[in-house]
Image (tube, grey):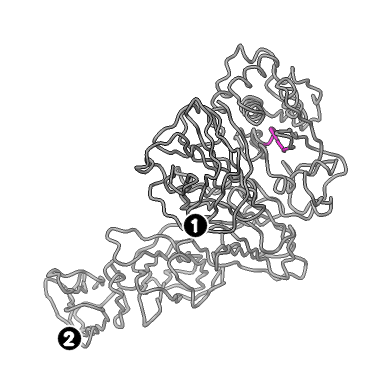
Amino acid sequence: MRRLWIGVLLFSHIMAMAADGAEEASVSSVKTPAVAICRVELNPPGDDGKREWVELFNPDDREAEIEGWSIAAAQSGTIVTFPPNTVVPALGILHVTFEKADGHALFDSEESILLTDDSGHIVDETPILNDTKNDRMIWTRLSEDENALLQSWRSESLYQRIDQHALGAPAEAESSLDSLALYLAGPAKNDEERARSIYRWITANIEYDVEGSMAGARRGRTPEDVLEERKGVCSEYSALFRRLCELSDIEAVAIRGYGKGYGYSVGSKIPDSSNHAWNAVKIDGQWHLVDSTWGAGHLEPEVGFVKRFEEYYFLSPPEGFVWTHLPEDPSWQLLDDILSKDEFEGLVYAKPAFFENDMKIVAPLGGTIDAEKGANVTLSAPEDVSAIAELLDERGRKLPRRFTQVRRSSGDLIVRAACPGPGNYTLRIYSKREGEDEDGEVYDWTLDYRIEAGLKAKAQTGFPVVWETFWDMGIDAKSHPDEGVIEAGSEFTVTFSAPEDVSLLARLLDDEGRELAEDRTIAQREDDEYVVMASFPKPSNYTLRIYVKRAGEAGGEYDSAIEYAVVAETGRDDLTYPRTLGTFAEAGASLRRLLEGRLDAGTSHKFEILVPGAEEVAVINGGTWTRFNDEGYIFCGEAVLSKGEAQVAARFPEDPSYSILLVYTVV
C-alpha cells in the first residue's frame, strides 16, 4: 500500500455541521466512495498541537485528485482544504496532519469528521467518535491487512498489526540479531513501524537483570548476549534497541543520563554520575525518545522485576519525558527550553498516568511542599478523570486514609494532606479514567510530592474520609468538615446539607471494623439539613460511615460517601434509636418524638413525626393499629405498647398498602 504524508493549514472560518452515529457502529447511509476517511487520531500523546491527523484511503487502482476538497470537524469547527496537486495514491493512503501549533484541531469527545468535494457535497463522514485518553488508540475502518475498507469503525492501537507480528516471532527468527531484525521489519511500512516492532519485541522478551543491577555486575553484555540470555540492564536494553535499528536501516543512538526510577524519592538530589540509559530514534527526519527498559516493566521492593508493558515510553513526547529522564548531553532533551539539573531535581515526580490522563499541575509547581504553608495540591483534569491519594511516612509506610482528601471543585482536583507530626512525608496521587478498566477500574500511580513538616509543625488528625459520591451528590458537611478524629461522649451528632432527592443512612463500626446494630444510628432530615446521630455502647474507637443514594431509584443501592473516626470517652449500652427503613429516608421523614429506640411496655408513649406526602401514619404493635392525627404532614399520636416490636408505617397517595418507616423495640 502506498502512503503519502501531507501537512495542511487551518482556515479561520467555521462550518456548522452535524453527524449521526455511534462509537462502534456502521457508517451512515452515505455510499462508500472512491476516496474515504479510513483512520482518525483525535487525542495523541502529549500536547495535541501538530499531532492530530486524519487518513484518507483510495481503493481504486488510479490515483485520485482531491484539489479543493475539504476535511471538516463537526465539533471543533476546524476546516482544512487541500491545495492544488493533492492526490490520494492508487490503492494507498493520504496522511493529513494539522499545522495548528496549540489547542485542539479535533475535539477528543463527540467529534465527527466530514469529507467534502470541491462542490461542497459530503463524500464521506465518520460516526461520532470519542478518544479521551492521551495515548495511541485511534479510530479505524481499515481491514487487518490495511488493504480494504470495512463498514464498521473500531477503536484500536495505532500499532495493533505490527505489535501482533512482533509478539508472534517464531524461534527460528530469534536465532540471531540479523534474522530477528529481518523478521521484525517484515510487514512494516515505514521507519516508525520498524522501530515499534523492535520496541515491542524487546519489552516482551527481555527481562531486567535485577541481581546484576544491584551488584553492579554484568554490565558488559553485547546485544548478542542479551538476545541469548533474554536478560539485561538498562544500558544493555538500549544497546540492543540501537543494534536492531541499525540492522533495519534506522538511525538510533543510546543516551546516558539520570532516570527517576527504582529507589528514587521526590525531592532527592541526583548524583553527578548517570544511572540510566535509553534511546533516541530518527523517524522522518526527526528524533524521538524511547525507553525500552521502562517499557518492559518496573522494579518493586521485595518483589523484584514486575513485567508490565508500558506504552508511554515509545516515542514519548519530550516535554513529558524530561520530567523523569535527564540526559548527560542537554541537547537530547529535544526541547527548545533546556531544563537545568536543579530544575529537574525540583520537579514533581510524575508517572505516565499523569500525561495519559491529560492532567496539569495548577499549584504548587515544585515537588516539595512546606507543610506550615498548607499541604494542598491543585490539579486540572478532564471531568472523566478521578483521583485518590495517600500519605507515606519516611519509611514508606502508608498512613490511615484520613490523612488525605481529594475533591473536585470548579473543574479542578483539590488534594489535601495533613501531617501527624514533624517529619518528611510523601503525598502520592493516583488517577483513572471512568469506564476504562472493566475489571475494577484500577487507579494508576500518577504523582508524588514531598511534604516537609518542620519541628514546629502542629500534629494534625486529618480529615473525614470522603468518597467521590459525596461530592457527586452535592453534599456538604455543615459540622465537623475537617476533623479526622473526633472526641465524643456516649453520643455524637453530625449535620450535612444535601439536595432534596438525596437519601442518607448511617452505620456504626467498632474498632475491628464490625458493623454494630442498626439502632446505634439514625439519619433524618430536619428542615434543609440532614442530621445523623450515633450512640456508643462503651468507651472505644469507632467509625461512623454515611451512605447515600438518589431518592426514587428503584432497587438502587446506597454507596459509601463519608466516614468519621470517633473516640468515645464514655458509653451507654441502653442508648439506642428506632431502626429506620429505606422508605423513611426516601420520604424525607423526620422523627420529632420519640428518638429512644427501646420503649417500656405498658406505658403510654407520645409520637410526633413529619412525613411529607403521606396521607396516613399509624403505629402497629401486637396486632393493634393506632392511627395518628394529621396536622399538615406532621403526624401525632399516643399509644400504650406491649412487648415486642412497634412499627410506624405510612400510606401514600395511589398506594393502598402501608410502608414501614421505622421500628421500636418494646421491653
Left or right: 558 as drawn, with respect to 55: left
Q: Secondary structure at mark 1?
A: loop
Q: Nearer the viewer, residue 262 or 195?
A: 195
Query: Which quadrant of the structure image shows residue 292?
Result: top right
Left or right: 618 as drawn, with respect to 508: left
Which residue is under mark 2? Answer: 629
Magenta-span inclusion, residue 317 = no
Image spot of residue 306 (x, y percent)? 62, 34
Which residue is under mark 1? Answer: 15
Q: Nearer the viewer, residue 178 or 660?
A: 178
Classed neighbour count for the residue bearing mark 1: other residues with Cα under 10 Å, few (<14), some (14–19), many (≥20): few
Task: Reply above or below: 110 against 543.
Answer: above
Residue numbers of the magenta segment = 288-294
- Give the residue displayed 51% in from the left and 59% down from the top: 383
**Residue 234: assigned label:** none
| Nearest to viewer (mark 2 / mark 1) | 1
